[in-house]
């Protein structure tokens, strides 16, 4: 009776060992996730300069993105009305956070200033709030990355506000790393347009003239801070 049981027990043990080996093999062979960011570091001397007593400050609040792409996974276009969610290709943080961080970094470098969003700041220093609402954030693998954003620059504590729209399409002929890089370049282009608008709005009171959107962006003119702006309707201070 004991001897009859031994082969069965051995077979059961061997079967369990086989299942364990298969489970380990499946775990080892599962696809790995790849993570991408829009905040690529720049080690050039101009990029690492520190702002000292800047003439003005900026605020970059959270960025709104369309709900269908507000997730860590890449959402790529497979056709005009079809998208695919990629589980293995992911943003390091949510796209809105990635865009905000990249814009903040680029603007502080270009303007030689500090992003004081969420931090106290002295009343005597002018502050310009940069609000961004992304209308489209499209990823076309092997083709292009497109960002369509409406943004505004507002002089805090005054009525001066400039509202513009930027539509930027960057080629992405390679894999998903090229797609992420194309989005990074698109964000940098928008940051450059915003930086031009901030400089122009900051100089508007001295010039006493209206400010228009940069040539590469579209939108209405903004009045100098001494007069209310038509594009100020519905905007909180």
Image: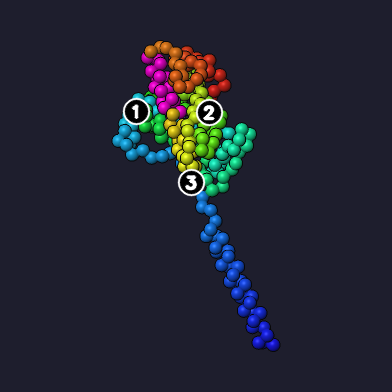
What crowding class fits label 3: few (fewer than 14 Cα within 10 Å), some (14-19), or many (20 or more)?
Answer: some
- For marks 2 and 1 on the same chain, the one whose residue lies earlier in the sequence: 1
Q: Secondary structure at mark 1?
A: loop
Which residue is disc 2 drawn over? 148
Left or right: residue 173 versus residue 3 is: left
- Give x and y (percent) for residue 168: 49, 28
Vertical placement of residue 120 versus 230, above or below: below
Residue sitting at x 50%, y 20%: 218
Any magenta on residue 106? no
Q: CA distance from mark 2 to mark 3?
A: 23 Å
Vertical placement of residue 77 versus 6, above or below: above
Which residue is disc 3 drawn over? 35
Residue 109 versus residue 73: which sits nearer the camera?
73
Residue 114 versus residue 147: which sits nearer the camera?
147
Residue 137, can we see it? Answer: yes
- For marks 1 and 3 on the same chain, the one whose residue lies earlier in the sequence: 3
């Amino acid at each position: 009776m004991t001897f009859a049981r031994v082969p069965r027990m051995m077979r059961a043990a061997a079967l369990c060992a086989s299942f364990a080996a298969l489970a380990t093999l499946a775990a080892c062979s599962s696809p790995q996730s790849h993570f991408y960011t829009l905040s690529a570091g720049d080690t050039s001397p101009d990029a690492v300069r520190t702002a000292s007593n800047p003439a003005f400050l900026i605020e970059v609040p959270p960025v709104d993105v369309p709900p269908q792409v507000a997730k860590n996974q890449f959402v790529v276009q497979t056709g005009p009305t079809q998208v695919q969610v990629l589980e293995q290709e992911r943003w390091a943080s949510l796209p809105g956070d990635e865009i905000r961080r990249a814009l903040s970094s680029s603007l502080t470098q270009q303007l030689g200033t500090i992003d004081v969003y969420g931090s106290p700041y002295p009343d005597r220093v002018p502050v310009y709030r940069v609000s961004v609402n992304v209308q489209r954030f499209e990823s076309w693998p092997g083709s292009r990355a497109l960002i369509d954003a409406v943004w505004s620059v507002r002089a805090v504590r005054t009525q001066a506000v400039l509202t513009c729209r930027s539509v930027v399409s960057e080629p992405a002929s390679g894999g998903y790393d090229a797609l992420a890089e194309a989005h990074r370049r698109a964000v940098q282009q928008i940051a450059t347009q915003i930086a031009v608008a901030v400089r122009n709005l900051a100089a508007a009171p001295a010039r006493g003239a209206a400010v228009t959107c940069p040539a590469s962006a579209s939108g209405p003119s903004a009045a100098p801070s001494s007069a209310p702006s038509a594009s100020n309707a519905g905007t909180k201070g």
